[in-house]
Image (cartoon, rainbow, N blue to C red):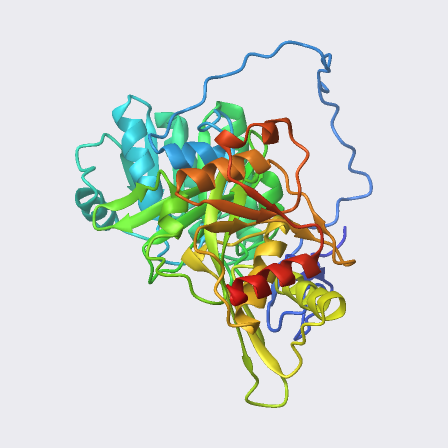
Amino acid sequence: MGKPANIFVCQSCGSVHGKWAGRCDACGEWNTLVEEIAAQNAPKGNKRKKSRGIEFVDLGGISEDLPRIDMGIAELNRVTGGGLVPGSALLIGGDPGIGKSTLLLQAAGFTAKKGIKTAYISGEEATAQVRRRAKRLGLADSPVHLAAETSLGPILDGLMENKPDVIIIDSIQTLWSDQLGAAPGTVAQVRACAQELTRYAKKRGACVILVGHVTKDGQIAGPRVVEHMVDAVLYFEGDRAGQFRILRAHKNRFGPTDEIGVFEMGESGLSEVENPSAMFLDGRGEAASGAAVFAGLEGTRPVLTEIQALVAPAAFGTPRRAVVGWDSGRLAMVLAVLEARCGVSFGGKDVYLNVAGGLKINEPAADLAVAAALASSVFDTPLPADSVVFGEISLSGDVRAASRTDARLKEAAKLGFKRAIAPAQKSETQKKPNNLLPLIAIKTLPELISRVEAFAEG
């Protein structure tokens, strides 16, 4: 019989090492290897017992679609794809204090009032603390089953006895199983507890929502295998000092992965923002150089945001490139195309780029708006305040069409914009100019620079 072998597991990425080292070879993090006891090697003569096997079915069979559970928060339902699916497991991550517990407690209060048996299990706060928050949110009379426990065994026993339909675990990093010798919060404990809770959700048809901590890089702490176990992974984004929060789906087996939900944090909790475009453009004053309004898409919903750029002489030898809310690699590409194809030099100049409102943009159609903001800052020329910009830039300097142009233009017209600077579109609805904004067609990036210079000349 083999002896138990000591293994060392990285607490950042979950990789296994045969011996301790100061730095993980897989993710490069320092001082993250923790010793764990591996299972004993199976005896050579030990034979596996014969089981009843598994039952195979036809792919074209008919399965009953269970109705989704309405959580009472339209933005949360939008991100999840229309509500919670019975028998699913969700993982919600976000920075400390961003509002994860507040949002889930509000959702739990609504589902409990509708007669859906809901359990809220807190591993970070005492029941008195959760009750005080519920009172502040106006949920003191909600029939939510509340408990404070960190041991997995009693939690599973309580769930088997009470059989709730919606279960909220806050948070998965605080749970521990007595079947493992590792400390709470380690990779082994997080993986084992998440696996048991996910198995319970699939077997009992309940919906389990797990709250996860995030690392300094913004990733959910613990092994990435947890994200593979669950059916949906949601991230809560935003600045704790600000009032707006954005819930974004990174994985969803029952809905889209590009939808966002926008919330506003107030004294009475999180409230929904029905028109995110108006919120992101709120406080926008007179036209100033270095600002461009981007007509983007977040899932099925058009969202308008302001992109701000500042180009200033570098104080030291090496110029800085600072980006907030956009991909820094994408900015480097746009700067290179502006220099190579348009002759606009950024050497010896600091470049700062910011997306107002705390939104993170991942859409390539923001290229043209970024280029317009940069050119406006370089020439110190404000863009027309009544115009929106969108389009993708290629390395050759050509401007490519963006998807769903009609939805972008209709949203801009609804908010009072009068024109759009974008590539020429091939759309049937473009034949109906009464319903859309006038389009200033841009084929190449030099044409955009010419337009900006023309704005300077009046």
Could you tell whether 155 is left or right of 58 in the image?
left
Give the residue furthest to the top.
62
Give the residue furthest to the front.
458
Could you tell whether 240 is left or right of 64 in the image?
left
Examine the rendering and report whether any part of residue 25 can be seen.
no
Q: Which residue is pictured at 52% across the width and 42% down the height?
A: 298
Examine the rendering and report whether any part of residue 105 can be seen.
yes
Residue 243 x/y as whole percent: 32, 55
Give whichever of 283, 152 is nearer the camera. Answer: 283
Q: Which residue is pictured at 69% across the width and 66% down the height?
A: 338
In the rendered image, the vertical position of residue 229 relative to residue 265, given as above or below? above
Residue 129 x/y as whole percent: 23, 51
Q: Quadrant of residue 195?
A: top right
Residue 121 x/y as whole percent: 35, 41
Give the residue furthest to the bottom.
316
Give the residue furthest to the right.
44
Q: Which residue is pictured at 69% across the width and 73% down the height?
A: 21
Give whichever of 181, 176 is nearer the camera. Answer: 176
Q: How many marks?
A: 0
In the rendered image, the vertical position of residue 431 relative to residue 186, given as above or below? above
Q: Which residue is pictured at 63% across the width and 84% down the height?
A: 348
Give whichever of 205, 446 is nearer the camera. Answer: 446
Could you tell whether 55 is left or right of 326 in the image?
right
Could you tell whether 328 is left or right of 302 in the image?
right
In the rendered image, the vertical position of residue 298 relative to residue 377, given as above or below? above
Residue 133 x/y as whole percent: 22, 47
